[in-house]
């Protein structure tokens, strides 16, 4: 595969197809027994999710400025789920990703004040895979609880390299951390340490060490790499890339304005340069990871998924969609989804079937041949058949997403109802509903709510049933434990305090 030249005239060191050629070469020299072993080896999984990276922050999605040559090539060599949705803010997305359940069921409603803590009795993808014999590791952002029993190592991750709260440079950070992204203060299975290097580089390096260790034990692995980049603050970003972007014209006029919605408002151009610097650093790390997988001869049998947690935080290019982080419009809840698994999936294919974060849990389990725990009820559906190229009319399903501040969902506050064809949305406080026929109007330009009153009534009824069920769940029941044998020192911050609304 031919790669774009990066801005520093250093050609990419790897084409994704190299792993395929290498594996075929190795198999030619293998005995039949070795070949059978390779064919039946358990599937490894790497789930990569960036933070506040919008669907337009990739060259492959039409951004003419940002440099993401490796991810662009990866996307073209993967299966794309073109209508993949997440919540408009991070913790709700993360809880649904880990459990396959709507975030309200897990106790997560918000991003702080105790409202981003996931119920300890939820069953996570890490717990299921660990119990099936997988090594499980998280590297980066958890954002579902900082104290026992809500930490990642309490929720199925045997190796946990993470920061507290919603990110570095936030109130949950240790006092001596200085808001650093370079040489950040992190936690290793609950023990504080100071890492060396830029945070995203650290996460990927730690993930590779984890994979090596799993291989030394002859165990399959599940690595969840959830970098907090390119989330704010923006004061500490890779200097090489910052200098590159500061030398460019980043005005709105440099980006495509059609089709769809133009960039609304002028973002701080220095912030834009800093975001893109972190995005390009992410791209370098994904390339580094795939080079490592090739060296370890793991590329063929490793399912790698790349996605984002919500829309971009800022007024920047969103691939023609309307909205941004925290919005219920497409730009706030539409995420890229690329799945790369050469052993099973046909590269360069695409599915337009409606899918969402809750579908990742069952998809990974099916890909790994691991049974769903008996009695576990989830909201997601496996995407594996569609990733493998299944065609035909998809079954009718409804995806409902709602994100807001506060402990309880208010009907229609910042909510959207999605089907294969339709999108009914109320952005912000309850008020005006809009209806879009996404089969004819993918950028949601033309409100047709007056033209299709029966569709509006149907989608409103689906939402009413859903919100009635969600509002029965009380998210303010989670206890905080102090002084347990699992946590010698308990540090509570604004992430943990459950502060009821007035």
Image (tube, grey):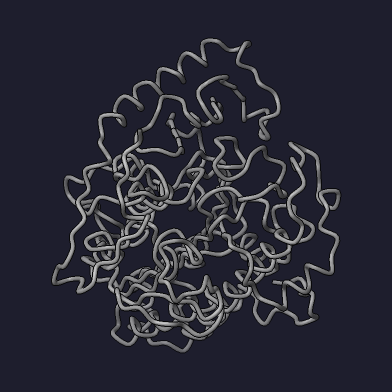
> Is residue 384 something that shows in the picture?
no
The image quadrant of residue 437 is top right
The image quadrant of residue 435 is top right
Q: Which residue is at the front of the view, 109 or 125? A: 109
Q: Which residue is at the front of the view, 281 or 389? A: 281
Q: Which residue is at the front of the view, 375 or 79? A: 375
Residue occupying the far left of the picture: 485
**Does residue 167 appear to the left or right of 56 in the view shown?**
left
**Does residue 472 appear to the left or right of 296 in the view shown?**
left
| Numbered circles on residues, count | 0
Q: Looking at the picture, does residue 415 appear above or below residue 490?
A: above
> Is residue 201 something that shows in the picture?
yes
Percent across and percent down for residue 135 are: 30, 74
Q: Looking at the picture, does residue 257 appear above or below residue 489?
A: above
Percent across and percent down for residue 14 are: 65, 79
**Does residue 421 appear to the left or right of 277 in the view shown?**
left
Percent across and percent down for residue 191 are: 31, 78
Percent across and percent down for residue 19 are: 55, 78
Q: Looking at the picture, does residue 137 appear above or below residue 435?
A: below
């Amino acid at each position: 595969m031919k790669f774009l030249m990066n801005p520093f005239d250093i050609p990419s060191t790897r084409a994704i197809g190299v792993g395929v050629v290498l594996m075929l070469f190795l198999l030619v020299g293998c005995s039949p027994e070795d070949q059978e072993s390779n064919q039946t080896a358990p599937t490894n999984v790497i789930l990569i999710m960036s933070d506040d990276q919008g669907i337009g922050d990739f060259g492959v999605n039409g951004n003419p400025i940002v440099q993401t040559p490796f991810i662009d090539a990866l996307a073209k060599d993967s299966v794309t789920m073109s209508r993949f949705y997440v919540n408009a803010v991070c913790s709700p997305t993360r809880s649904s990703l880990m459990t396959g359940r709507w975030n309200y069921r897990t106790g997560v409603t918000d991003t702080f004040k105790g409202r981003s803590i996931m119920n300890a009795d939820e069953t996570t993808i890490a717990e299921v895979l660990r119990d099936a014999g997988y090594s499980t590791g998280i590297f980066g952002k958890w954002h579902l609880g900082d104290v026992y029993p809500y930490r990642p190592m309490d929720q199925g991750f045997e190796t946990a390299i993470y920061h507290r709260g919603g990110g570095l440079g936030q109130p949950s950070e240790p006092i001596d951390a200085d808001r650093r992204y370079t040489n950040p203060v992190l936690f290793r299975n609950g023990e504080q340490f100071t890492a060396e290097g830029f945070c995203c580089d650290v996460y990927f390096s730690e993930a590779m060490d984890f994979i090596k260790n799993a291989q030394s034990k002859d165990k399959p692995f599940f690595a969840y790499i959830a970098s907090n980049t390119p989330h704010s603050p923006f004061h500490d970003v890779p200097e090489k890339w910052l200098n590159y972007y500061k030398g460019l014209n980043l005005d709105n006029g440099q980006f495509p304005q059609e089709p769809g919605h133009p960039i609304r408002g002028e973002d701080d151009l220095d912030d834009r340069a800093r975001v893109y610097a972190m995005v390009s650093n992410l791209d370098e790390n994904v390339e580094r990871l795939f080079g490592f997988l090739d060296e370890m001869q793991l590329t063929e049998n490793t399912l790698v998924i790349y996605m984002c947690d919500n829309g971009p935080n800022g007024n920047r290019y969103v691939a023609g969609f309307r909205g941004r982080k925290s919005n219920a419009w497409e730009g706030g809840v539409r995420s890229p989804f690329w799945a790369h698994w050469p052993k099973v999936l046909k590269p360069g294919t695409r599915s337009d079937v409606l899918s969402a974060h809750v579908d990742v849990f069952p998809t990974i389990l099916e890909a790994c041949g691991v049974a769903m725990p008996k009695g576990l009820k989830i909201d997601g559906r496996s995407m594996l058949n569609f990733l493998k190229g299944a065609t035909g009319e998809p079954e009718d399903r409804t995806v409902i997403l709602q994100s807001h501040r506060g402990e309880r969902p208010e009907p229609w506050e910042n909510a959207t109802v999605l089907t294969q064809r339709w999108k009914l949305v109320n952005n912000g406080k309850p008020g005006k509903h809009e209806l879009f026929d996404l089969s004819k109007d993918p950028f949601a330009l033309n409100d047709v709510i007056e033209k299709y009153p029966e569709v509006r009534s149907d989608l409103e009824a689906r939402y009413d049933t859903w919100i009635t069920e969600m509002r029965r769940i009380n998210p303010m029941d989670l206890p905080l434990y102090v002084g347990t044998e699992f946590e010698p020192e308990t540090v509570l911050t604004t992430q943990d305090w459950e502060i009821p609304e007035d």
